[in-house]
Image: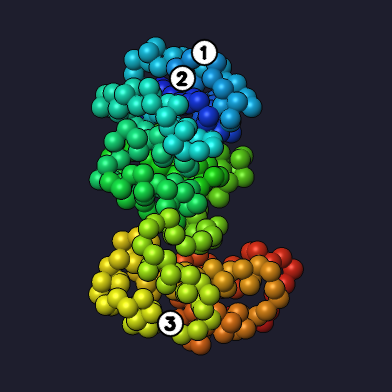
């Protein structure tokens, strides 16, 4: 069944310090969709406009200027607001654009849907609209986002999160998948597929896990937990137990596990697994070791367990990951 034929107004926000491509690419997608529809003898659906506080806005740390189509005060009603990724320090970038927050809240309560791209989630979360809701953002900013917005639940590894007419996307180019989802919602599957082919985007990618790098969450003040984190990272090849680690810092297991989860957002077991799998990923990328060699190097002896944990964390099997990031090398083992 074909979509409703009335126009949808897409307002692409142009904050100061926005990432330039995160402003221009959404405009390109929805404008191109209009052209696809015209080529099929259908009416265009989207009224695409760039909106901001000023007629000209400096973005990407001042390297570029974007001319807006409308000022915020000139927008009476819109169907969808897209918040692009921000550039540079997130606190500074959000503070530069605080005057946009009341407008975003007002438009949402008037019925507009809101979508943040990548770390545009920081500006979206500053509105309070995400409190008590889930959100996606760039995996490298999880710790900072959680510390800044403890009332918002970050969905680890997700490409897209949708809650109550609020959308958010994962890191960097993940926003293309959110744009395709919105395009399909406002038109149809055929148009979204056409756009995915035109822009060479995998339309159904649903996780940023294969691209995530685990560096441990050490931006906290619990010295005993930090000591254990460093021990795990130095001894990941060994068999580590929660009791053993708790004893190292002379804390009861129950208290240790609670404190560890509070400051790292991982259980002790999860943290150990993530450190081991991160080491395995680096080995697959940088060496020609086969799957079994890497498995033993990071402290696993059970092939099934290694494969299960690896796929849960990265979204790929060890063979798939190795073949993806080490071109030209294929071994004869399958895990």
State the residue in front, 194 or 39.
194
> Which residue sits at x=34%, y=15%?
76
Q: Which residue is mark 2?
A: 52
Q: Secondary structure at mark 2?
A: strand
Can you give x and y, in whole percent of width and height, for residue 318 in the image?
A: 56, 73
Is 150 situated above or below 44?
below
Residue 217, quarter of picture: bottom left
Q: Which residue is mark 3?
A: 240
Reading the chain from its start, which is encountered first: label 3 or label 2?
Answer: 2
Residue at 39% in and 65% down: 223
Eye-nearest disc, 3 or 1: 3
Q: Is 62 placed above or below 294 here?
A: above
* In front of the other: 16 or 320: 16
Q: Decide if residue 274 is on the left or right side of residue 246.
A: right
User: Is the C-beta separation of discs 1 and 2 under 8 Å?
Assistant: yes
| Image location (x, y in percent) of residue 159 | 45, 50
Vertical side of 105 occupied by 230: above or below:
below
Q: Is 279 placed above or below 131 here?
A: below
Distance between the Cα atoms at labels 3 and 2? Answer: 53 Å
Tell me the mark number nearer the camera, choosing from 3 and 2. Answer: 3
Question: Is residue 221 at least partly visible in the picture?
Answer: yes
Q: Which residue is mark 1?
A: 55
Answer yes or no: is residue 115 visible.
no
- In the current view of this chain or complex, which residue is farthest to the bottom? 301
SS of the residue under disc 3: loop
Image point (36%, 48%), residue name: 147
Name the quadrant containing residue 195: top right
Mark earlier in primary sequence (3, 1): 1
For the N terminus, the quadrant is top left
Gap in angstroms between the C-alphas marked 3 and 1: 59 Å
């Amino acid at each position: 069944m074909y979509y409703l034929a009335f126009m949808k107004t897409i307002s692409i926000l142009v904050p100061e310090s926005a990432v330039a491509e995160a402003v221009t690419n959404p405009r390109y997608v929805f404008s191109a969709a209009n052209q696809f529809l015209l080529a099929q003898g259908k009416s265009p659906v989207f009224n695409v406009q760039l909106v901001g506080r000023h007629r000209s806005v400096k973005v990407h740390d001042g390297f570029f200027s974007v001319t807006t189509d409308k000022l915020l005060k000139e927008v009476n009603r819109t169907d969808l607001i897209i918040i692009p990724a921000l550039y540079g320090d997130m606190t500074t970038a959000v503070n530069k654009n605080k005057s946009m927050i009341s407008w975003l809240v007002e438009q949402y309560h008037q019925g507009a849907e809101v979508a943040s791209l990548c770390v545009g989630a920081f500006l979206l979360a500053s509105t309070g609209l995400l409190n008590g809701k889930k959100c996606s953002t760039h995996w490298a900013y999880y710790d900072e986002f959680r510390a800044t917005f403890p009332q918002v639940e970050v969905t680890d590894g997700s490409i897209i999160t949708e809650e109550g007419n609020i959308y958010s996307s994962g890191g960097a180019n993940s926003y293309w998948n959110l744009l395709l989802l919105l395009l399909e919602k406002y038109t149809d599957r055929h148009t979204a597929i056409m756009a995915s082919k035109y822009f060479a985007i995998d339309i159904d990618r649903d996780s940023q896990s294969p691209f995530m790098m685990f560096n441990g969450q050490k931006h906290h003040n619990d010295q005993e937990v930090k000591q254990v984190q460093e021990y795990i990272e130095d001894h990941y090849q060994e068999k580590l137990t929660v009791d053993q680690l708790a004893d190292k810092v002379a804390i009861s297991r129950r208290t240790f596990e609670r404190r560890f989860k509070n400051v790292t957002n991982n259980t002790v077991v999860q943290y150990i697994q993530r450190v081991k799998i991160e080491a395995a990923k680096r080995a697959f990328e940088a060496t020609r070791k086969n799957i079994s060699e890497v498995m033993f190097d990071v402290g696993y002896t059970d092939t099934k367990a290694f494969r299960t944990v690896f796929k849960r964390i990265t979204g790929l099997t060890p063979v798939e990951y190795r073949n993806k990031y080490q071109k030209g090398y294929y071994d004869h083992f399958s895990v």
